[in-house]
Image (tube, rainbow, N blue to C red):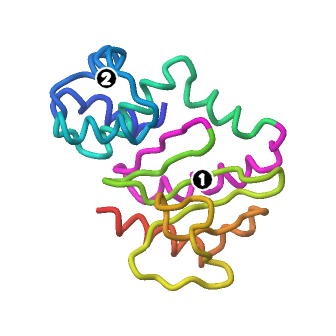
């Protein structure tokens, strides 16, 4: 398990009033049609911060699938994209201990206090990296969020490990810094 995620789980009782297993049991008694509904419920009704709420819901829904299984399933038939994914994670992990990497069914959320990046294998030949910025203009490479909608403000299409260049690293760091 990712070190940052484990730290978050370890801190959960102190920060949220319940352990992850207690939250999982509690959420079994509820019915939400969307991930965001459950997150918003925990935030509004139980004063859980967004990062903890998102992690609780994601881990509760995916109890039967490990993080590794979720990532493996995303890249089935797209194994050629795994070096891009792994290289991006290596860059992101350098930012600090406060980064949480949360695999979901179709993407991987990268969270500080709030989500600042989203990694999604979009096609067999491309990963879409969603980033969150305030008032940053789009460019030919730093496009509008496209399929990410409001989860991210911008998107970068990656089809090669060489796409993880200094410019992209700068954008990732900026998005991370904005997520304080």
- Magenta range: 77-105
Q: Is residue 1 above or below residue 146?
A: above
Tell me the residue that label 2 is attached to: 20
Residue 180, quarter of picture:
bottom left
Q: What's the residue at 73%, 46% (across, down)?
A: 82
Return the x and y of residue 105 as percentages of the image width and height: 60, 35
Q: Nearer the viewer, residue 92 or 78?
A: 78
Quick one: SS at disc 1?
strand
N-term mark: 2 or 1: 2
**Is residue 88 highlighted in magenta?**
yes
**Is residue 89 highlighted in magenta?**
yes
**Disc 2 to disc 1: CB gap under 8 Å:** no
Question: For residue 119, which numbered disc appears in the image?
Answer: 1
Report, in whole angstroms, how far the alpha carbon at label 2 lies from the one at label 1. 25 Å
Return the x and y of residue 45 as percentages of the image width and height: 18, 35
User: What crowding class fits label 1: few (fewer than 14 Cα within 10 Å), some (14-19), or many (20 or more)?
Assistant: many
């Amino acid at each position: 398990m990712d070190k940052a995620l484990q730290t978050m789980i370890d801190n959960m009782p102190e920060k949220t009033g319940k352990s992850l297993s207690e939250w999982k049991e509690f959420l079994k008694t509820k019915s939400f049609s969307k991930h965001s509904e459950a997150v918003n419920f925990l935030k509004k009704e139980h004063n859980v911060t967004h990062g903890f709420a998102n992690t609780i819901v994601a881990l509760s829904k995916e109890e039967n699938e490990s993080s590794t299984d979720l990532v493996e399933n995303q890249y089935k038939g797209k194994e050629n994209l795994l070096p891009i994914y792994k290289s991006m994670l290596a860059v992101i992990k350098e930012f600090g201990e406060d980064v949480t990497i949360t695999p979901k069914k179709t993407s991987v959320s990268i969270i500080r206090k709030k989500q600042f990046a989203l990694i999604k294998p979009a096609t067999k030949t491309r990963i879409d990296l969603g980033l969150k910025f305030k008032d940053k203009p789009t460019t030919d490479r730093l496009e509008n969020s496209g399929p990410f909608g409001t989860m991210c403000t911008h998107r970068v299409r990656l089809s090669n490990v060489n796409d993880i260049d200094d410019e992209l690293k700068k954008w990732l760091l900026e998005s991370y810094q904005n997520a304080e």
